[in-house]
Amino acid sequence: MGLEKGLLLIEAFGISCSPMTLSQAAEITGHSAASTRRLLLTLVRLGYARCDGRLFALEPRTLRLVHAYVNSTPLTKVAQPILEICSERTRESASLAVVDGQHDVFVARSTRRRSLSFGL
């Protein structure tokens, strides 16, 4: 139950699209203020969030969760070289997304390599 609440709290930052106060986080997640406070302080203690006065925000450490997914699924390992070839041949970016509920989540990408030239 605690892990579930913590993950929902992390997702709440994506819903708010900005740092949140404790009361905003509790409102979005539907958890009590006391429970939300404990969760936020745990995230801060573990380095997944920071507190700046009244506002809480995620830290870059949360990207480790994404990295764990990308490294653990064979899909990205198989798709990345194909995306690189497509990008090189088309001279456009190529991306791979998977469906997660009602959302499309991009899990791999290759961008077009651009060369810069300057005229004198």
Image: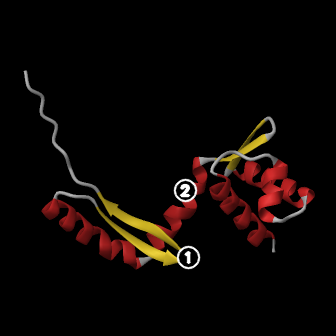
Location of residue 85 (image quadrant):
bottom left
If the image is split into quadrants, where does the C terminus sit?
Answer: top left
Residue 76, x across and y down, in percent? 37, 72
Question: Can residue 39 be spotted in the picture?
Answer: no
Residue at image point 22% right, 58% down: 92
Pointer 1: residues within 10 angstroms few (<14), some, or many (20+)? Answer: few
Residue 101 horizontal side relative to residue 37, left or right = left
Pointer 2: residues within 10 angstroms few (<14), some, or many (20+)? Answer: few
Q: Which residue is mark 1?
A: 102
Q: Which mark is residue 63?
A: 2
Of helix, strand and loop, which one carries label 2?
helix
Residue 104 horizontal side relative to residue 35, left or right = left
If the image is split into quadrants, where does the N terminus sit?
Answer: bottom right
Residue 24, x across and y down, in percent? 80, 52
Residue 28, x across and y down, in percent? 77, 60
Give the answer, above or below, for where 38 lies relative to 18. below
- Check disc 1 and give the amino acid type: Gln
Lower position in the chain sequence, tag 2 or tag 1: 2
Residue 28 horizontal side relative to residue 91, left or right = right
Residue at image point 83% right, 65% down: 30
Residue 117 horizontal side relative to residue 8, left or right = left
Give the answer, above or below, for where 25 lies relative to 3. above
Q: CB atoms at circles 2 and 1 under 8 Å apart? A: no
Give the answer, above or below, for where 92 lies relative to 115. below
- Check disc 2 and give the amino acid type: Leu
Location of residue 80 (image quadrant):
bottom left
Of helix, strand and loop, which one carries label 1?
loop
